[in-house]
Image: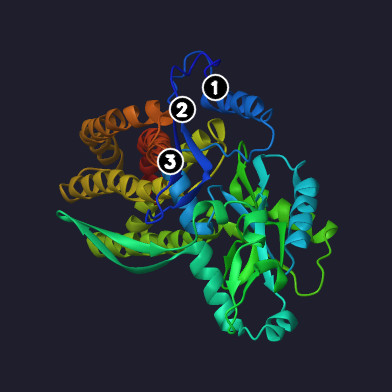
């Protein structure tokens, strides 16, 4: 990372405390990489970073930002936008299925940081009691297990006080009798008749590999294939993944796949925002009707809504091309701004008509009267939004910047089209 011109320093945290909200083992590290963009945009920088880090063997690497990682972890249990969770009973079968799914979907456009949850085997010493030999020497299984626990793990039997401090007093074998498999095999075990026998007389002792961790969700074993999205919208990528997996992967009996991540919350939020948008339009129309007490005038003001959407749609198309939750909120915010401009014009037209002006004079004079307030309001709002638009590549502006861009584009189109369309529609309705 330090070879890249935008990066001057890095810092690393390895592991997290057990009581931390996002606890993780010492096999996981977080590398913070502050960067300053100069001659290229963020997408190009991230693409080069992914290409460089792809050469690191034996590691699952995910690129993102701290807040986004926390949100992803809360949503799906992984630090990635998409989590494909495979549930089953056999860990080896789960790992095989995970790698098959990874191989099938890695060609999908927009996928980045595609990883299968690592299944690392560690060497473990297993002590398996031989019940027949235990019975021969008259040793109960419970006594045998207590012996293993005390001799090798230790048991607290009291406390030792020294000045103002206390220490646990733990009883267990000396280290030379428990630091190797051979020493454990020859550890002496008491029998009820007073004999001392080596441990291997009554137990099978051997070293074997076992998984370092076993991930579970709702008590079921699982393995996760995780991925981020770059250059495409999340929902489309997930749809492509689901179609590919359904067409190419056949799951054994009692195995299943669940999809988790940001797209679940995005889908719910999109549905909620759609209902909210319809509700906002209905309430705006009701308030306009109550204000003007005229269905036609309320409809003329409401025509400003699509005028505002035009600029928002164009600015999304020519920037990211992705309609996110943040940009959707920006579209909803435009409803009120667009309605305000229409109210200023139509209410002034009403006053001039009541003063006895003819239709032509009403439109020209009313539009000129409201030109300055409309332009000043749009200008001050736009100037306040420009810093958020410019700082879109900086960390922490992932939500503010898309919303600000949509509002800025909508302000531009609404302000200029409002001064043309509303007077024309008003004249047409009243002529």
Q: Residue 66 carries which label?
A: 3
Q: Does the residue at mark 2 contact the one at mark 1 (Cβ under 8 Å)? A: yes
Nearer to us in this view, 82 or 365 = 82
Q: Which numbered disc flags the more N-terminal residue, 1 or 3?
A: 1
Nearer to us in this view, 94 or 390 = 94
On screen, residue 184 above or below 62: below
Determine which residue is flagged by label 1.
1
- Rounded to the nearest whole Å, what is the CA distance between mark 1 and mark 3? 17 Å
Report x, y in % for residue 207: 71, 57
Report x, y in % for residue 316: 51, 37
Determine which residue is flagged by label 2.
33
Pointer 2: residues within 10 angstroms few (<14), some, or many (20+)? some
| Quadrant showing the N terminus | top right
Q: Which numbered disc flags the more N-terminal residue, 2 or 1?
A: 1
Q: Which label sits in the foreground, 1 or 3?
A: 1
Nearer to us in this view, 60 or 388 = 60
Report x, y in % for residue 399: 41, 42
SS of the residue at dot 3? helix
- Rounded to the nearest whole Å, what is the CA distance between mark 2 and mark 1? 8 Å
Q: Residue 184 carries which label?
A: none
The image quadrant that residue 281 belongs to is bottom left
Seen at 50% across and 63% down, the residue is 153
SS of the residue at dot 2? loop
């Amino acid at each position: 990372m330090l070879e890249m011109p935008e990066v001057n320093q890095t810092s690393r945290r390895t592991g997290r405390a057990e009581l931390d909200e996002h606890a993780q083992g010492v096999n996981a590290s977080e590398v913070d990489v502050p960067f300053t963009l100069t001659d290229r945009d963020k997408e190009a920088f991230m693409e080069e970073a992914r290409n460089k880090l792809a050469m690191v063997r034996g590691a699952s690497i995910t690129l993102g930002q701290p807040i986004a990682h926390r949100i992803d972890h809360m949503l799906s249990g992984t630090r990635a936008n998409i989590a494909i969770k495979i549930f089953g009973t056999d860990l080896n079968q789960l790992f095989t299925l995970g790698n098959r799914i990874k191989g099938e979907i890695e060609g999908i456009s927009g996928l980045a940081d595609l990883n299968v949850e690592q299944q690392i085997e560690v060497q473990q010493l297993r002590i398996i009691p031989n019940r027949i030999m235990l019975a021969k020497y008259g040793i109960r299984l419970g006594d045998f297990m207590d012996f293993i626990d005390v001799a090798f793990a230790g048991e607290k039997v009291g406390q030792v006080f020294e000045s103002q401090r206390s220490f646990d007093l733990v009883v267990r074998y000396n280290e030379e009798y428990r630091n190797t498999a051979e020493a454990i095999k020859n550890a002496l075990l008491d029998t009820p008749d007073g004999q001392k026998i080596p441990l291997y007389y009554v137990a099978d002792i051997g070293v074997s590999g076992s998984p370092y961790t076993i991930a579970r969700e709702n008590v079921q074993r699982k393995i996760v294939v995780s991925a981020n999205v770059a250059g495409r919208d999340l929902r489309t990528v997930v749809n492509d993944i689901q179609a590919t997996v359904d067409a190419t992967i056949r799951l054994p009996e009692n195995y299943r796949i669940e999809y988790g991540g940001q797209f679940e919350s995005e889908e719910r939020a999109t549905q909620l925002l759609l209902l909210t948008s319809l509700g906002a339009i209905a309430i705006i129309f009701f308030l306009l009707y109550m204000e003007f007490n005229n269905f036609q005038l309320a409809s003329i003001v409401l025509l400003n809504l699509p005028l505002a959407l035009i600029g928002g749609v164009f600015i999304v198309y020519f920037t990211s091309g992705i309609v996110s939750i943040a940009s959707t909120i920006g579209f909803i915010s435009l409803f009120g701004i667009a309605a305000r401009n229409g109210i200023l014009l139509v209410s002034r037209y009403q006053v001039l008509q009541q003063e006895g002006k003819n239709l032509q004079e009403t439109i020209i004079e009313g539009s000129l009267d409201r030109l300055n307030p409309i332009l000043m309001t749009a200008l001050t709002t736009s100037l306040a939004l420009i810093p958020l638009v410019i700082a879109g590549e900086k960390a922490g502006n992932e939500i503010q910047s898309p919303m600000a861009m949509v509002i800025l584009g909508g302000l531009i189109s609404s302000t200029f089209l409002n001064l043309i369309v509303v007077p024309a529609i008003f004249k047409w309705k009243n002529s």
